[in-house]
Image (spheres, rainbow, N blue to C red):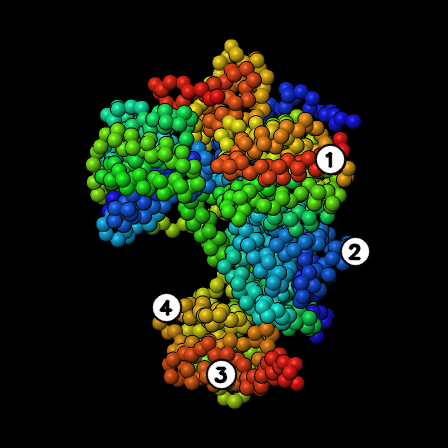
Amino acid sequence: MAGEMMTGNLAAAWGARLAGVDYIPAFPITPQTEIVEALAEWCDCGAMPARFVMMDSEHSMMTAAGAGAAAGARVFTATSSQGLLYAFEVLYSVAGWRVPLVLVNVSRALAAPITLEPDHNDVLAARDAGFLQIHAETCQEVLDSILMAYRIAEDERVMLPVLVNLDGFYLSFTREPVIVPDPEKVAAFLPPLRPAHLGFKASAPHALGVAVLGGTPYTYFRHQMHLAAMNALQVHREAAADFERLFGRRYDVVEGYRLDDADDVLVMSNAFATKGRAAVDAARAKGRRVGLLRLRVIRPWPAEAIVTALRGRRAVGVLDQNLAPGLGGILVQEIAATLYHDPARPKAICSFIGGLGGKNIHEGEFDAIFARMEQAGKAGRGEGPVLLYTEAEHREMEQLQILASESRADR
Amino acid sequence: MRSIRFHGRGGQGAKTASRIVGTAAFLEGLTAQDSPLYGAERRGAPVSASTRISREPIRERGLITRPDLIVIADESLIGDPTARVLDGLSERTVVFVNAALPSEQARDQFRIPGRVTTLDLTDMTLRQFGKPVALSAPLGAVACRLLGLKAESLKAAITGELADLGLPETVIEGNLALAASCYDAVPVVPVEEMAGTPPAPVSLWTPVYEPPTLGSARISASANSPLRETGGWRTFRPVLVPDKCNGCWLCFVYCPDGVISMTKDDLPLIDYDHCKGCQICVQECPTKALVAEREQEGAGTWRAK
Amino acid sequence: MTWQRETFKKIKQIPREEHVLPGTSLCAGCGGLEALRLAAKVLGDDVVYVNAAGCFTMLAAYPFTPFKGSWLYTTMGSAPAGAQGVRDALDVLIAKGRLPKRDDLKVVVLGGDGSTYDMALSSTSGAIYRGLDFYYFCYDNEAYGNTGVQLSAATPYGARTTTSPCSLQHPAGTIQEKKDIFEIWRAHKPPYIATVAPRYPLDLAEKFARAATFTGPKLFLALSACPTGWLYDPGETPEVAKLAVETGLWPLKEAINGAVTHTYIPKRKPVEEYLKLQGRFRHLFEPTKQEEAIRHIQERVDAYWRQVNV
């Protein structure tokens, strides 16, 4: 096997290192810390010609990152969960500045209750900020996506920041073989950063991020961000082709697994998609014609690729590793809206909620998913949100509740 | 429904005037709606407020685009393109201008196509209070009269609105007296319903992508703010009495907006396109070489203390 | 020993050139703008202003900027972090030869008291702690002015704001004492801190000239008399600023590497003369005079100057 064993976090750090970033403002948060630790060491020992600065919060970190990029530097930073939310207003600000920085988010479920393991309520909360989003399934993809992220972000047709997501624990602390690309090839893939609208200098002053008065300029500029994000679909296509030519690995905005003759398709994202592939194989062994569609790029929303992959299917299931209280799954809404106008839209769309707070999704749960999808497809009526939560898990839960509620007198 | 749009400069009382009319109409059993248009603008900058009164439910929101009555607190706003005081008016729209000119003359001089009526509220206010203060009560009084609202509703509305602002009773009393005389003195032109210009049909436009040099909120022009003139903010202008000037530079140094420069002979040169009329130079001039003159043709000089 | 000005001795040494041009939508008579304009005469044009949300946000409003230098609007809570990002990027780009040294800029944070005393305190503390080479210009008008004059941690005892009204429970209005941000900054030991007031232009200009000789955080707290929030006629801005200094309420001072010098020793008029001028203190005088509140303010000033030991 080629490459070397490394964690998703280290792969992320390698992505920043190979991209030749100039500036890294940082702030630690579990499970992201290993990224900034590696970068701090490399900057300190001279392996990376970048300035590494420890900031006082994610809010400051994100501001410094945006400001450094506004000043013309190639900037990298990383956070997770509460940190992403602490930086939240700044995400919108720097996207509005149109700075092409790359932010890695290591997914972790949001407090309260506070926890450490992943789900995607953190990263999906940021989906409307103006950042593009790439969600990685493997440690290799983390590294490769960071390189692609800079290439796309820095394209004059885009000029938006990109968030690359990896799941806490399941990728961040998980080692698997990763090929570290050749720096010379990376240089060929990623041209030097020369943004026309950025860079503060005495000889060419400009004002950035200024206030606008009235809805007209606001509408125009915000819509330009939308057009820029939509341009990223084409730019991604070009970058993916170049990446494949140089490195031999192919990344599309969505990735299908055993779709060709599939009746029913399950839609997933991030690290658990690996388990989804295994579940597809297992289901097929039992005679179900099922497939998997992994969403890799979530902003821009790859509507055309999704319709192409899902039209004509009997049932589509969306496994949301997030929960919007009062609504259900987040991604299923976008999938359903995307499919609505297609005359060959699937007969049923089912919504599943699973993997919250890093909870495992068992093989049996995947069996249940495919069974319910088949049933829904045959009936022509979708269902959900269905919570992936087992009887055994609930018995465990009841034990915890007893322990939590037992008073001293009861003992 | 009748729609009344107030225009003034920040601090002149257009917003409170719009509320006085809203409250007065409400007290007479009408449905009313009043709302200010908040820009980022400050004291002295053009502001507007909208009041709608009706016997039916009001199915509108925000800035009035088809005004039946336009109330202009400051004639200098008419020539200020950013103030857009005459937007949406028709020949049937009634336009009140606070000016020391007869209605016909104001109509011609300011080239207002609507039905114009005037009264010199600034002068009446100066007489009442001895200094320039907000014109909320006089503007509200004029509007109420033109709309046919009763004097007692006006009185109750002014009392309530000014008390809400925390003004002392003596000031409210003064405003009530002033409002009563404005109510009686304004030449009445009846306000019709739906007098404004009906909205023109619109075509939707689909923007295309532009590089962020143009497509983001970015200014590459250097120091272009003087393109925006703020001279219209003034109610009073500083005027130099050259004989009295000792060339001390203090007016130049203290001017917040940097609109005073010193000539080779150390005389202050005032940029009236941008002077906001704060009167700091007048107040600080050690030799009283700068005096404040009211910004109105034909009006007498009013001197700061 | 009295403090000596070395660069700016006469009023006619104030540079004629303007660096913050007119046409902005700030209030007529803005004391903060008056202070910034004077500061900019010393700072020049090779500057990038990193702005926090506040009244000064309206200085650069699309499509107009009053500056010949650059501008970046950040957020209310993180302008010093924005300054960090800009400074670091300029350093890196110069070191890597991607930006000529002659294109280097001074980085100047602009923050109101709401940002400075409250929201951006963590960000500011971090920037000072990291020894960031920047200027911090706080225009202190002692309230959240841009939102219509609400209580901030810079609002002094006895002032009325829209969220600290004069009431039966609190007849004095604001009951908290103004946060001593100068001492909070000083505890971080930056090389230079100064207070300034626009009515003292030579003192102000001299301090900006002195600050230029220091690398690291350079902090300026500018009294920004505010006709809109303090309720006085705009023409009285210099007079109000003058009385703030002459009563001893706003000490003009600097701290070089922590060592404090008062740059002007007022004869200390009674605080009443300052308070009486402003509508935000009117409730201390009418309908009945609140002797105790006024005495409290006077005693605080007296206590301050006793410990100054001039």
Inter-mark Cα distance, 2 to 4: 56 Å
Pick the front one: B169 or C106: B169
Is B200 located above or below residue B57 in the figure?
A: above
Looking at the image, which residue is at 48% across and 64% down? A302
Q: Which of marks 4 and 3 is in front?
A: 3
> Circle 1 sits on which residue?
C306
> Circle 3 sits on which residue?
A370
* Comes first in the chain, label 2 or label 3: 2
Is C114 located above or below residue A318 in the figure?
A: above
Q: What element carries label 3?
A: helix
Q: What element carries label 4?
A: loop
Looking at the image, which residue is at 74% across and 55% down? A43
Residue A92 seen by the camera? yes
Q: Residues within 10 Å of mark 1 (few under 14, many from 20)?
A: few
Residue A155 seen by the camera? no
- Left or right side of A300 for B191: left
Q: What amino acid does circle 1 point to?
A: Arg
* Comes first in the chain, label 4 or label 3: 4
- Circles 2 and 1 in contact, beta carbons < 8 Å: no
The circle on residue A341 is 4
Q: What amino acid does circle 3 point to?
A: Phe
